[in-house]
Image (cartoon, rainbow, N blue to C red):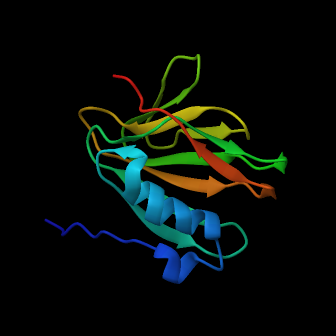
Amino acid sequence: MSNKIVQTAGRALLGEFAPEFAHFNDDVLFGENFEGKSYLAPISKEQIPIFNVTFELCCKNHWHIHHAKAGGGQLLICVGGRGYYQEWGKEPVEMTPGTVINIPADIKHWHGAADDSWFSHLAVEIPGEETSTEWCEIVAD
């Protein structure tokens, strides 16, 4: 049996390199915009930052929108467990290993673990101009 390793990037490591991800890690991922526990592990800091986000059972983030004046958005690649992605006004999409979700800028959505499974995905932030994240309401069951 292996030990669970919890990694956090924090402002000390990401503040200058990726301020948005530093905020995401310190204030959001481990802050008030998730229901349940989740963990962030940096995979790459070169060219395009890639992070592995792992959600414990039932954990999900709140509805949110990745805004951008141009470009932007997010790419999610499921690497383990089972989870869901949902766009506002649409049915949830089940994510299992290998599922890829392209999220254009300005689409309200959430993602997180199924009630009976942990869930892990790679999060790739698509470069854009004047990017920001708007956090919205809790996802209703």
How far across and how far down the image is residue 111, in percent?
47, 38
Give above or below for 87 relative to 83: above
The residue located at (39%, 50%) in the rendering is 32
- The one nearer the camera, 68 or 47, is 68
Image quarter where the N terminus lies is bottom left
Locate residue 39 relative to residue 56 in the image: left or right. right
The residue located at (28%, 70%) in the rendering is 5
How far across and how far down the image is residue 57, in percent?
26, 41
- The one nearer the camera, 128 or 12, is 12
Locate residue 81 relative to residue 28 in the image: left or right. left
- The one nearer the camera, 138 or 50, is 138
Give above or below for 117 relative to 68: above
Image quarter where the C terminus lies is top left
Write down the quadrant of residue 114 in the picture: top left
The residue located at (47%, 32%) in the rendering is 137
Locate residue 100 relative to residue 132 in the image: left or right. left
Write down the quadrant of residue 54 in the picture: bottom left
Give above or below for 59 relative to 48: above
